[in-house]
Image (spheres, helix red, strand yellow):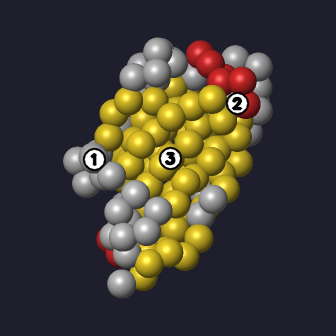
């Protein structure tokens, strides 16, 4: 059983920054690919970013150049640094994990999920 807990969400103005954190339980965190997904009101959940256990990253086109995913294996934590935030980034952000060397953009590939943290970007 893996438990993920997100934090760091909040209300920011457009152009501002937030850093989300996801702390994972378990003793094999470094072998897990990690992903961030988000779901805006009235929209489907979408892929945001992923980090493989080889520490390679992938990003959705909508956040590329603005968001950065990283991990700290010693702290069992994955981060999402969000810069130049836009109102369209407003969503509940979810952390996800999978026991695979490959990070994917598909939510169904991730068996473990956090509870989500709200990010609201005002105009």
- Residue 123's quadrant in the figure? bottom left
Image point (72%, 24%), residue name: 74
The residue shown at (52%, 60%) is 18
Element at badge 2? Answer: loop
- State whether residue 107 is above or below residue 100: below
Residue at the (56%, 42%) spot, across then down:
79
Q: Which residue does the numbered mark 3 point to in the structure image? A: 80
Which SS class for mark 3?
A: strand
Question: Which of the two residues, 11 or 111, is positioned nearer the viewer here?
Answer: 11
Placement of the N terminus among the 4 image quadrants? top right
> On the image, numbered disc 2 is attached to which residue?
76
Residue 70 is left or right of residue 85, and the answer is right
SS at circle 1: loop
- Nearer to me, 39 or 111: 39
Q: Is residue 115 visible?
A: no
**In the rendered image of this protein, does residue 17 appear above or below residue 62?**
below
The answer, for residue 87, to whether it is visible in the render is yes
- Label located before the other in sequence (1 or 2): 1
- Image coordinates for residue 20, horizontal then vertical, percent: 57, 53
């Amino acid at each position: 059983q893996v438990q993920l807990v997100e934090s760091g969400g909040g209300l920011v103005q457009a152009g501002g920054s937030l850093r989300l954190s996801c702390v994972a339980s378990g003793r094999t965190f470094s072998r897990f690919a990690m992903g961030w997904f988000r779901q805006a009101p009235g929209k489907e959940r979408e892929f945001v970013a992923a980090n493989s256990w080889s520490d390679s990253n992938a990003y959705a086109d909508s956040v590329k150049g603005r968001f950065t995913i990283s991990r700290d294996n010693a702290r069992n934590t994955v981060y999402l640094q969000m810069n130049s935030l836009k109102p369209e980034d407003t969503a509940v952000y979810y952390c996800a994990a999978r026991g695979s060397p490959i990070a994917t953009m598909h939510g169904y590939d991730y068996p473990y999920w956090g509870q989500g943290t709200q990010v609201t970007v005002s105009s």
